């Protein structure tokens, strides 16, 4: 083997080793840097939503009241994918445990469906993003680091591109009725959208009505949680948001749901 061949071989091996070393550092360094920074668990987030009486908590109670059969099934729902475990019947009511379970299930299926491919979760201080995706009527709703220091942002869901709107303030933009109809068939609420329907997150209840199933219940809870910590005060604000949604949209939603049964 000539000198040039030996040099090329050594350079090749060194290059591979440096590549592997750089790959290891890019994976390990953030873990060492961030390991001592406290991160909120889903249970912490649920307790925080309840203590603040946020829109996430009030919307979760509304979902439980609107769809009692699904809520009971959610308590019994088990799956290894999201780590969902059964909740005893005695504890099957809107509380921190059931809210945390719904958030965890919804988050896992949000990721699994690839929703983050089309929807970002970060409002930047450029391009009028606070006006386009922020809280209506509130000037400064730019994203900030501590919002992402929790279990539901591991990994962070900043997205890849915005085919649809940013969702980090979604709790302040649309109400539950809109979300239920939109997830079932986006064309009911957003004519011309290229978002596909998600009918597999729905089922029929004992009366034959189309209602969210356990996964759909969780997904709706998670979406309505996004940005709920920035909605102040929840009650008056949501009334204004509901009033800003045209009555025609709600009328068409009810009509389309009736036809879909």
Image (cartoon, helix red, strand yellow):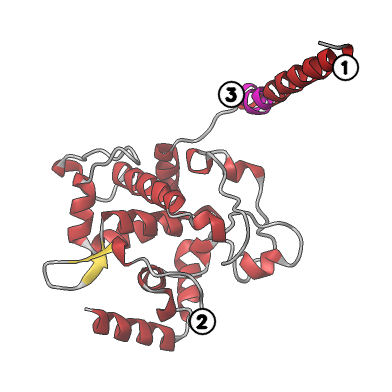
Tag 1 residue: 4
* Foreground: disc 2 or disc 1: 1
Of the image marks 2 and 1, the number of the one nearer the N terminus: 1
Q: Residue 192's mark?
A: 2
In the image, residue 252 sits, relative to residue 48, either above or below, namely: below
Q: Secondary structure at mark 1?
A: helix
Q: Mark 2: few, some, or many residues within 10 Å (few <14, many ≥20)?
A: few
Q: Give residue 71's position: percent from left, percent from top.
A: 23, 55
Where on the picture, by quarter, is residue 232? bottom right
Q: What residue do we see at 55% from left, 56% from top?
A: 117
The N terminus appears in which quarter of the rendering? top right
The C terminus appears in which quarter of the rendering? bottom left
In the image, residue 223 sits, relative to residue 236, either above or below, namely: above
Most common SS among magenta residues = helix
Q: What residue do we see at 53% from left, 33% from top?
A: 39
Of the image marks 2 and 3, the number of the one nearer the N terminus: 3
Q: Residue furthest left?
A: 206
Whether 110 is among the magenta residues is no
Q: Are marks 1 and 3 in contact (CB under 8 Å)?
A: no
Mark yes or no: residue 182 visible: yes
- In front here: 25 or 186? 25
Where on the picture, by quarter, is residue 97? top left
Of the image marks 1 and 3, the number of the one nearer the N terminus: 1
Residue range of the region highlighted in magenta in the rendering: 23-32
Q: Residue furthest right?
A: 3
* Foreground: disc 1 or disc 3: 1
Tag 3 residue: 35
Q: Mark 3: few, some, or many residues within 10 Å (few <14, many ≥20)?
A: few
Query: What's the CA distance linking mark 2 and mark 3?
Result: 45 Å
């Amino acid at each position: 083997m000539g000198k040039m061949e030996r040099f090329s071989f050594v350079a090749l091996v060194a290059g591979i080793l440096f590549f592997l070393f750089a790959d290891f550092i890019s994976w390990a360094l953030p873990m060492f840097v961030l390991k001592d920074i406290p991160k909120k668990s889903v249970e912490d987030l649920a307790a925080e939503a309840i203590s603040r009486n946020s829109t996430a908590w009030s919307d979760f109670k509304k979902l439980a009241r609107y769809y009692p059969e699904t809520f009971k099934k959610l308590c019994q729902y088990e799956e290894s994918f999201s780590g969902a475990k059964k909740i005893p019947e005695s504890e099957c009511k809107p509380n921190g445990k059931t809210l945390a379970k719904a958030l965890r299930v919804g988050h896992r299926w949000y990721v699994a469906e690839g929703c983050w491919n089309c929807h970002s979760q970060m409002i930047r201080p450029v391009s009028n993003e606070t006006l386009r995706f922020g809280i209506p009527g509130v000037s400064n709703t730019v994203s900030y680091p501590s919002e992402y220091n929790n279990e539901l942002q591991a990994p962070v869901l900043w997205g890849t591109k915005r085919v649809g709107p940013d969702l980090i303030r979604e709790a302040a933009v649309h109400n539950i009725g809109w979300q239920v109809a939109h997830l079932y068939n986006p064309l009911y609420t957003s004519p011309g959208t290229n978002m596909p329907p998600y009918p597999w997150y729905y089922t029929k209840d004992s009366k034959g009505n189309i209602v969210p199933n356990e996964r759909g219940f969780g997904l709706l809870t998670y979406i309505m949680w996004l940005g709920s910590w920035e909605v102040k005060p929840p009650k008056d604000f949501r009334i204004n948001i509901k009033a800003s949604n045209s009555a025609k949209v709600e009328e068409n939603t009810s009509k389309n749901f009736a036809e879909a049964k």
